[in-house]
Image (cartoon, rainbow, N blue to C red):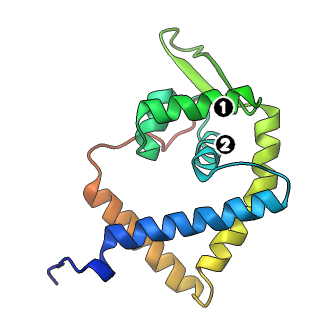
């Protein structure tokens, strides 16, 4: 099949709308549970829980955000005591970002809201449907990726 652009079925438009809708659901749940957090902050916290010791540039690359946006996010998260920047012990030329204990605690509380938002998004999907959709989206992302990000391993 040769993909053809149709506005109502545009991959970019649909994925953007879905991403924003899932983010809205999560923010709503977080606010109901006493947290004031935007989806982009959640993305950083979630990334750092899975892949600690990441540079600001690596975070920007992985989340496909510009460095200025990531700096502002990290400034806010650091001000709130959720992340800390420190010199990377294996290479003093780099600062890395890690979650604090407070950030890890927030992650474990907030992941319930992420799960609830995804459950709503995948309502009436079978496990197989969900897995196939995610696998296909990963393939599309791979087709469009300009570089790999080296997030396959945990950095000590």
Q: Which residue is drawn at 64% across and 49% down?
A: 42
Position of residue 112 in the picture relative to residue 49 (left or right): right
Q: Residue at x 63, y 71 (%)?
A: 118
Label 2: state its secondary structure: helix
Query: Label 2: which residue?
Result: 49
Residue at the top extreme? 92
Q: Which residue is drawn at 14% across and 80% down?
A: 2
Q: Where is residue 144 in the image (x, y as percent from the top left)?
A: 27, 56
Label 1 or label 2, whichever comes before in sequence order? 2
Q: Position of residue 37 (x, y in %)?
A: 70, 48
The image quarter containing residue 114 is bottom right
Q: Which residue is drawn at 43% across and 42% down?
A: 65
Q: Which of 71 and 147 is in front in this view?
A: 71
Position of residue 107 in the picture relative to residue 2 (left or right): right
| Up/down of 132 relative to 13, above or below | below
Q: Mark 1: give few (<14), some (14-19) or many (20+) Cα within 10 Å.
A: some
| Up/down of 23 relative to 98, above or below | below
* Measured Cα–Cα span from mark 1 to mark 2: 17 Å
Query: Label 1: which residue?
Result: 76
The quarter of the image holding the C terminus is top right
The quarter of the image holding the N terminus is bottom left
Q: Which of 25 and 120 is in front in this view?
A: 25
Q: Which of 69 and 89 is in front in this view?
A: 69
Residue at the left extreme? 2
Position of residue 16 in the picture relative to residue 123 (left or right): left
Q: Where is residue 49 in the image (x, y as percent from the top left)?
A: 67, 42
């Amino acid at each position: 099949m040769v993909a053809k652009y149709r506005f109502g079925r545009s991959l970019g438009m649909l994925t953007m709308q879905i991403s924003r809708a899932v983010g809205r659901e999560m923010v709503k749940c977080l606010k109901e549970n006493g947290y004031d957090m935007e989806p982009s902050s959640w993305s950083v916290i979630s990334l750092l829980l899975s892949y600690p010791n990441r540079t600001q540039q690596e975070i920007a690359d992985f989340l496909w955000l510009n460095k200025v946006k990531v700096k502002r996010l990290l400034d806010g998260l650091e001000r709130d005591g959720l992340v800390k920047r420190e010199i990377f012990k294996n290479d003093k030329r780099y600062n890395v970002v890690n979650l604090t204990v407070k950030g890890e605690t927030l992650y474990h509380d907030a992941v319930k809201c992420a799960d609830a938002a995804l459950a709503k998004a995948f309502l009436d999907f079978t496990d197989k449907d969900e897995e196939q959709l995610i696998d296909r989206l990963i393939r599309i992302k791979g087709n469009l990726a300009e570089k790999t990000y080296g997030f396959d391993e945990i950095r000590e």
